[in-house]
Each structure stands twice: as structure tokens, then as C-alpha cells.
Image: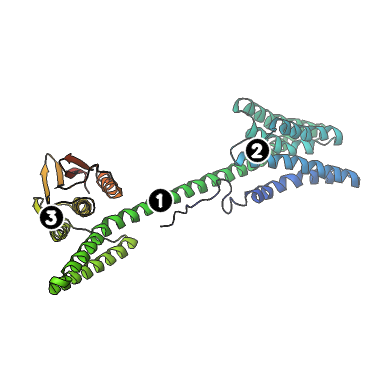
Amino acid sequence: MNDATLTMPAVFPRWPVRRAVWFLVASHLPFVVFPPFVVITRRPGTSVPEVVLIGLVGVAAGGLQLRHSLAAARGERPRGWPLTFAAILGLAYVPFWWWSSYDWALLVQWFVIASAAMLLPRRPAVPLMVTLLIATPVVQGLYEHGLGFSWPKTLTLMCYYLAIMVMGSTALYGSARLVGILDDLFAARTEIAEQALATERFRVSRDLHDLLGQSLSAVSLKGDLAMRLLSSDPGAAHREIEDLTSVARSALRDMRAVTRDEHDVSLVLEIDSAAAVLDAAGVRTHVAVELPCLSPALDAVLAWAVREGATNIMRHSEATTCSITAARRAGLVRLEIVNDGAREPVSTGSGLTGLAQRAHARNGSAAGEYLGGGEFRLRVELPEGGLS
């Protein structure tokens, strides 16, 4: 199987997250354009150099805010953020004294409040944001009241300015947080996809081992037997070849079933198959199974155990006798397969690992144990109440 892994970068992997820089640029653009536009249109007689300067200051403030927003989307602060935050404060308030425009200070507060929320710890950030949200509309309103506006109109303008500041700063902060959340969602989706891919790879590997291990061992056994009988008993050799063909076809069906995850196993059929294969290999098999009325889930796990046990006997031992026993005991269903001729030491291969995981999924256990004297025991225990 291919060992390639599914990978995507953790930051900005796909649309719209993959193009998050352009998404944030687009969302910041109105806030960059609007303050210079208001200042220029409300200052008759503004010269071309002043227009260019106002525009450049607006772009500089917006660029610093965009830098803060991109870092916030990644869940971090940008390098040198105290300097860039101080620069935004300067770009917000110094032009106010230069151009004598409350509009500039009011509108560029968007950047100050949003940057404070992104960069500062909560304890200093909250008082600063509340102070700006309250003081700026009040100062702006009082300034316009001094120009002759009535109090009702002044209060209306204060509420209007407050709404503009809240919506603007919330939009800036929210766009950065949105990109960060989308990035987290795509990273989580990537992790889930990788886990699903790994799970499916393990399932296919486990099922191929469990389904084809016994069949391929039987093919090898019957092929060797047919070769030995070919000269002395051609008829028997022909029958072994027919059996070999049947086993190979069964293995092919099993392999196709693995790819569709449609394979079903039966304890009764697996015991019969194991006994036949072991008998053909010269292993005397004793079967004592007393398990009527098994649930499908329990039956399947025990069937896999019988198949794995028979495969291990043929591949990893020189057995002459084998016993397969199963019974209920104290709320547990226990299956044991014991054979002689085991080679020491016995290592836990992928087949036993897969069987243990099948049993664990049903709150049970499966383990192989070398008993000494060439005996090996495979034991599977499953709680009847833990099955579905």
C-alpha cells in the first residue's frame, strides 16, 4: 500500500482560508479609504500634495492594522507589535492636530480599538477600548454642539458616532477572528481526514492478513501436497489441485470483499474450514464448541479468532495436534486454541494485534501465550453483555 500521507498546511490551507490575505485586504479596504475620503471632502481647498499625504497616512494606518489582523488570524502577535501599536496611535491622533479634523480621529479609532483587542492583554485592553468608545463620540458631539447644533441633534450624533466606532472596530476584529476560526476548522478537518485514512489503511491491512493468510497457507500446502502425489497418485494430486483452485477463488472473493468492506465470517464455517485445512496439513484437530444462540457481533469476533489461530498454526509451528474449545463461563464467552509444535519465542505479529483490537472493540481481550513444552495457546474472552 502507498505510504503517502494526506497533508495540508495548517495556516490558510484552502479557499477561503487559503486566500485569507486577500480576504483581509478586501475587508480592510473600506476602512482605509473612508477616513481620507471624509477628511478631503470636508476640507474645501485641499491641495494635491495634501490629498496625497492624507491618502498615504490612511494607507499606512490601514497597513499596520492589516499586519495586526494577519497575526491575530494566526493566533499570535506580530514581531515588534508595541512599536506598530504606538505607530497606529500616532497616525490616529497626530493628524488630528495637523488637519484640525475630528473626523480623522473619530474614524481611525477603528484601527486603535481593533488593534488594542488583538494585541493588548485583557486587563489594559478593556478599559482602553471602553474609554475610547465613550470619550470619542462625546468629544466629537460637544465639538459640534459648540458649532451651534442643538442638544437633541448632538445626542443623536453621539449615538451615531458610537455605532460607527463599534461596528467598524468589530468588523476589523471579527474578520481576523473569522479567518483564524476557519483555519482551525480546516486544520481539524485535515486531522480527521488523516485519522480516517490511517484507520482505513489499518482495516485493509488487518482484513487482508486475516482473510488471506489462511487461504494462502492452504494454497501453499495443497500445492506442495499435489507435487508430492503427482508421481505416486495422480488422481489424488488432481483432487488437491482442484481444491487448490477452489481455495484460490475463495481468496480472490475475499480480497474483493476487503475493498468493499463487505466480508462476513461465521464461527461454524471458520471452524469447519480450519479443521479441514489443519487435517490436510497433518494436524489432528479436536473441536469442543458449545455456544448456541450467539449474537452476530460475538460470532464474528470468534470466527476471526479461529481463522487467525489456524493461520498461525500452519505458518509458525510444526503442530501435530490442536484443540479448539469454546464455552460460556461467568458471563464471559471464552475461546481457546491450543497447539503443540510451537517455536519459542513467540512474537506478537500483526494478526494477533488486529485480533486484540477486534476483541477490545467489544470490551474483551485476545492474547497468545507460549505455555512451554512446545505448546501455544490463543485465548479470546468477550463479555456477553458488552456485545451489540
Kind of residue at disc 1: Ala
Mark 3 and mark 2 in contact (Cβ < 8 Å)?
A: no
Q: Residue furthest front?
A: 231
Query: Residue 88's image quarter?
Result: top right
Could you tell me residue 196's position as x and y percent?
Answer: 40, 51
Please give the residue where the numbered disc 3 appears in the rendered image: 283
Whole-percent x and y of residue 79? Answer: 68, 34
Task: Determine whether, in the image, residue 197 is placed left or right of residue 327.
Answer: right
Are there few (<14), some (14-19), or many (20+) residues within 10 Å of tag 3? many
Q: Nearer the viewer, residue 224 or 141?
A: 224
Residue at image x 63%, y 33%?
Answer: 117
Disc 1 secondary structure class: helix
Which quarter of the figure has residue 366? top left
In the picture, measured across the screen, residue 149 lies left or right of residue 127, that is: right
Relative horizontal placement of residue 145, taking residue 65 as reference (left or right) = right
User: Image point 71% across, 32% down: which residue?
Assistant: 85
Residue under numbered circle 2: 166
Cα separation between marks 2 and 3: 83 Å
Q: Residues within 10 Å of mark 1 (few under 14, many from 20)?
A: some
What amino acid is found at the position of numbered circle 3 in the picture? Val
Distance from disc 1 to disc 3, alpha carbons, whole Å, reads 38 Å
Res. 209 mark: none
Mark in front: 2 vs 3? 3
Q: Nearer the viewer, mark 1 or mark 3?
A: 3
Which labelled disc corresponds to residue 198?
1
Q: Earlier in the sequence, mark 1 or mark 3?
A: 1
In the rendered view, tell whether residue 166 sits above or below residue 216. Answer: above
Compare marks 2 and 3 and give the one earlier in the sequence.
2
Q: Residue at x 46, y 47 (%)?
A: 191
Q: Closest to the observer: 359 or 325?
A: 325
Q: Amino acid at mark 2?
A: Val
